[in-house]
Image: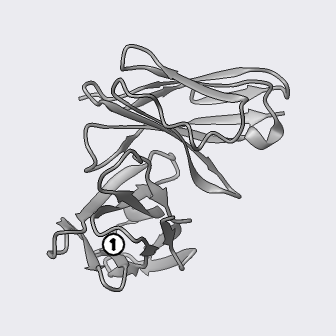
């Protein structure tokens, strides 16, 4: 079946602009995760959605970051007023249980 | 808080040889999952192998196997008959067994090079 998809693959934006990153999880997976991968910080957890429960936002680095998941499927990560330190690869993953998370190809965000 | 440590930033192996990547972790939980993920230059994270802490038997997936030492909190990955396609970043990751926390905790990664 289809894996996790993310769009866009690459995004270049100017400092101060807002960006939206999209994730389409594997069909039927109830859990969805966003991570950020940067050279200096490695892989960081951002936010976790599980079914209809309130999301775990404990990894969001600032209030400029937000995410939503509509209809228990597609998720959008929004970064407002982007800063250069937001430049990173943003990875989305989904899972049906704790036996493994399956990742998308990521979105490379470059803030100029 | 749980932590995962990969002490080898880079490793190299000759094609067809065997290599072992190290991972240690720290946790106060008794039940948890451990994973190895592979990230080639395409940046897609691929699940290589998983181990449930309550299982004493080491997991094996084709040429990939782990050496899980629960008391020592060690979880190494052995790649046998290395192939050029094995060249990638390898990440060790931890996941608690229950509760509301669902995110993986990753090590910093080991870059594996395979020499022809």
Residue B112 makes an appearance in the image = no
Front-most of residues B80 and A63 = A63
| Res A66 → quadrant | top right
Q: In the rendered view, does B83 fall on the left or right side of A87? A: left
Label 1: which residue? B82
Say which residue appears at 58% left-offset and 74% top-offset.
B9
Placement of B116 over or under A36, stated as above or below: below
Front-most of residues B86 and A34 = A34
Placement of B113 over or under B71, stated as above or below: above
Say which residue appears at 84% left-offset and 33% top-offset.
A112
Say which residue appears at 27% left-offset and 60% top-offset.
B50
Q: In the rendered view, does A64 fall on the left or right side of A33? A: right
Say which residue appears at 27% left-offset and 74% top-offset.
B66
Quadrant where the C terminus of chain B is found in the figure? bottom left
Q: In the rendered view, does A109 fall on the left or right side of B34? A: right
Placement of A55 over or under A37, stated as above or below: above
Q: In the rendered view, does B50 fall on the left or right side of B42? A: left
Instruction: State the image coordinates of residue B36 (x, y, percent, origin top left).
Output: 36, 62
Q: Tell me if mark 1 has few (under 14), some (14-19) or many (20+) residues whose alpha carbon lies within 10 angstroms of its own.
A: many
Residue B28 makes an appearance in the image = yes
Which chain is home to disc 1?
Answer: B
Instruction: State the image coordinates of residue A73 (x, y, percent, origin top left).
Output: 37, 20
């Amino acid at each position: 079946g289809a894996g996790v998809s993310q769009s866009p693959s690459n995004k270049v934006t100017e400092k101060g602009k807002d960006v939206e990153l999209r994730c389409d999880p594997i069909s039927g997976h109830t859990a969805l995760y966003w991570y950020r991968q940067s050279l200096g910080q490695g892989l960081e957890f951002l936010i976790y959605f599980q079914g209809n429960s309130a999301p775990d936002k404990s990894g969001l680095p600032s209030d400029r970051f937000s995410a939503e998941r509509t209809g228990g499927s597609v998720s959008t990560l929004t970064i407002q007023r982007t800063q250069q330190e937001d430049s990173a690869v943003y990875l989305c993953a989904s899972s049906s249980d704790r036996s493994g998370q399956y990742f998308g190809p990521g979105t490379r965000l470059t803030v100029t | 808080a749980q932590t995962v440590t990969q002490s080898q930033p880079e490793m190299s192996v000759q094609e067809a040889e065997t290599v072992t990547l190290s991972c240690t972790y720290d946790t106060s939980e008794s039940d948890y999952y451990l994973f190895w993920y592979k990230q080639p230059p395409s940046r897609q994270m691929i699940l290589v192998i998983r181990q449930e802490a309550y299982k004493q038997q080491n997991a094996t997936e084709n040429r990939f196997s782990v050496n899980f030492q629960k008391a020592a909190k060690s979880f190494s990955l052995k790649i046998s008959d290395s192939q050029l396609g094995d060249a990638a970043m390898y990440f060790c990751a931890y996941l608690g067994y229950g509760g509301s926390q669902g995110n993986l905790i990753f090590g910093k990664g080991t870059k594996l090079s395979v020499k022809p």
